[in-house]
């Protein structure tokens, strides 16, 4: 017999005119794992922030176990048994796991016995498979372990309904397996779990029931067993998604990029790249797989000439360009689509034309004697907008009015227009919806077929397995192995991403 633990009815919330939740309904049964699925900006986080008392809804009502409630704060929500693990953790680095767990509890009495707390937390970790040392200090822990602390914090407060906001975004594949098995244990024990995600694979794996949000509205709730992945994609996006990408192998033996023994520091002066060696061949997509923070950012900056190399060498098309200026590296045929497309990639207040020509306005076809050739620029920009299917109010409208996916397409259009020999793309589909992700994948494959060597950094293993000709795994600033998709499993790659299984399967 299904018993409703939570009903959210007609929830509406707007922020300065943006309707984040529009008459949303959500019904959750006790003991189920309920996925809240939707593309970025669909309103998932807002809805859960309303549930946990962080935001006040403009209208609508919340009923918990048959009783109407209004929460003034997350603390209020926890008292009613509802707790949320946010995307950004809220832990104190210098305190231990146990200290963090009890932090903020006001009914902890003066005779606090930390040994008992350690034990209680140890018991919780055992019961739910949340492996952690209660005496460890937070700074010593990995991101996955910190997440476990946040979960333990909620379990210690006896929440019966646990909400996790995109919990797998920061985890390695093995950690995702562990987390899912803990969540299953919790459901088994009668706890209810709401997991927010935009990843279909995860929903198909973990959810009992699914509610889909689209454009701030709840569009459907269904049992997982009654739906296919493809149907779910269509409901989430609101239209059909093209299925498979066709790909050919056009890789040659020629290296467009050769990094040998690269050492570089991060912004805090610690070694971020510790002797990294890797090559990208002409006409291949070389994927870089790894947990964020293992040197990916510094790698891109070294290639771009934005971060000094302390040891090792970088060759582009056989030419030594170690520690050369960014301009020289661009001229050698390197194009970069950076991780931070809003900050580093596009000038938000500039229009489409201006963004397309920031690096090429001096070229003879774009300007003459210091005057821009607007007629040519406009025609060219309109062609690009059409070719790349970029949705914009017009080539004179500022890019800040465009969606993330359309900005990304514009950035790719600009970076590929000069037919680079090496294209570096860092997390190019992060935050994009399914349609835009598909478009970016097409761009990458067609660039490769034209002979560009592509270095694709991604945290999405499915994406790398679909696109890459070879996958190099980065761990603590080094490449720990290179695998060929099809010859290695996700589990093997996941193991290498944590520093294990150092074999080379290429
Ligand atoms: N605090 C806020 N201030 C202004 N706008 C917000 C705020 N929080 C969310 N939004 C907007 O509300 C919409 C839904 O956001 P969100 O709930 O974060 O979506 P999701 O979690 O599904 O990605 C987005 O357009 C977002 O920009
Ligand atoms: Mg969110």
Image (cartoon, rainbow, N blue to C red):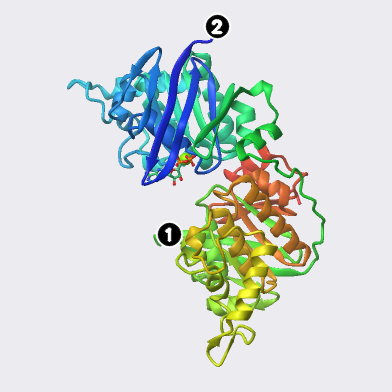
- The percent position of residue 324, horizontal first and vertical second, equals 55, 78
Ligand 1 shown in quarter: top left
- The percent position of residue 412, horizontal first and vertical second, equals 62, 63
Few, some or many residues within 10 Å of mark 1 (<14, 14–19, 20+): few
Residue 326 appears anywhere in the view: yes
Q: Which of 312 and 423 is in front in this view?
A: 423
Left or right: 2, with 481 as reference point:
left
Report if the beta carbon of the residue with label 1 is closer than 8 angstroms to ligand 2.
no
Helix, strand, or loop for circle 1?
loop
Q: Is residue 12 above or below residue 381?
A: above
Q: Which residue does the image show at 66% across and 37% down from the upper left?
A: 234
Few, some or many residues within 10 Å of mark 2 (<14, 14–19, 20+): few
- The percent position of residue 214, horizontal first and vertical second, equals 55, 37
Q: Name the residue under label 1.
A: 270
Q: Name the residue under label 2.
A: 1
Q: Which residue does the image show at 56% across and 65% down from the upper left?
A: 394
The quadrant of the rendering that contains the N terminus is top right
Disc nearer the start of the sequence (1/2): 2
Left or right: 213, with 116 as reference point:
right
**Which residue is situated farthest in the top direction here?**
1
- Give the spatial CA distance, label 1 vs label 2: 57 Å
Residue 61 found in image quarter? top left
Left or right: 233, with 506 as reference point:
left
Report if the beta carbon of the residue with label 2 is closer than 8 angstroms to ligand 1.
no
Residue 275 found in image quarter? bottom right
- The percent position of residue 70, horizontal first and vertical second, equals 31, 23
Residue 415 appears anywhere in the view: no
**Which residue is situated farthest in the left direction here?**
110
Q: Which of 244 and 392 is in front in this view?
A: 392
């Amino acid at each position: 017999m299904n018993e409703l633990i939570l009903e959210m009815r007609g929830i509406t919330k707007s922020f300065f005119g943006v309707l984040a939740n529009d008459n949303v309904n959500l019904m959750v049964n006790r003991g189920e794992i309920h996925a809240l699925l939707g593309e970025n900006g669909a309103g998932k986080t807002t809805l859960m922030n309303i549930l946990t008392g962080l935001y006040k809804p403009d209208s609508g009502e919340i009923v918990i176990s048959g009783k109407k409630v209004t929460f003034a704060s997350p603390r209020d929500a926890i008292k009613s048994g509802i707790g949320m693990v946010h995307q950004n953790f809220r832990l104190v680095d210098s305190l231990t796991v146990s200290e963090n767990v009890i932090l903020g509890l006001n009914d902890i009495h003066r005779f606090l016995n930390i040994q008992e707390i350690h034990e209680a937390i140890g018991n919780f970790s055992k019961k739910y498979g949340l492996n952690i040392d209660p005496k460890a200090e937070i700074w010593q822990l990995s991101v996955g372990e910190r997440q476990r602390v946040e979960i333990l914090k909620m379990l210690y407060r006896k929440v019966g309904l646990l909400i996790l906001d995109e919990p797998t975004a920061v985890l390695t594949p093995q950690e995702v397996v562990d987390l899912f098995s803990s969540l299953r244990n919790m459901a088994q024990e009668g706890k209810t779990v709401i997991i927010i995600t935009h990843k279909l694979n995860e929903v198909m794996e973990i959810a009992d029931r699914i509610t889909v949000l689209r454009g701030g509205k709840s569009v459907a709730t269904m049992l997982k067993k009654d739906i296919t992945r493809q149907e779910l994609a269509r409901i989430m996006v609101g239209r059909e998604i093209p299925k498979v990408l066709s790909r050919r192998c056009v890789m040659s033996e020629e290296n467009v990029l050769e990094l040998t023994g690269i050492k570089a520091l991060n912004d805090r002066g610690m070694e971020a790249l510790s002797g990294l060696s890797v090559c990208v061949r002409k006409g291949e997509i070389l994927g870089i797989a790894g947990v964020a923070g293992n040197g990916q950012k510094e790698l891109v900056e070294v290639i771009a000439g934005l971060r000094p190399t302390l040891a090792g060498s970088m060759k582009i098309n056989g030419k030594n360009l170690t520690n050369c200026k960014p301009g020289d590296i661009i001229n050698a045929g390197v194009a970069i689509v950076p991780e931070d497309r809003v900050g580093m990639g596009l000038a938000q207040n500039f229009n489409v034309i201006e963004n397309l020509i920031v690096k090429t306005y001096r070229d003879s076809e774009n300007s003459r004697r210091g005057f821009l050739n607007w007629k040519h620029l406009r025609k060219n920009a309109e062609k690009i907008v059409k070719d790349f299917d970029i949705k914009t109010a017009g080539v004179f409208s500022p890019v800040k009015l465009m969606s993330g996916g359309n900005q990304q397409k514009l950035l790719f259009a600009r970076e590929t227009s000069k037919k680079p020999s090496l294209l570096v793309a860092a997390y190019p589909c992060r935050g994009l919806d399914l349609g835009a992700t598909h478009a970016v994948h097409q761009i990458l494959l067609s660039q490769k077929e034209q002979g560009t060597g592509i270095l694709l950094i991604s945290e999405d293993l499915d994406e790398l397995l679909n696109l890459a000709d070879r996958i190099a795994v980065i761990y603590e600033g080094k490449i720990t192995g290179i695998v060929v998709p099809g010859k290695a499993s996700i589990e093997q790659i996941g193991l290498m991403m944590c520093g294990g299984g150092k074999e080379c399967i290429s």
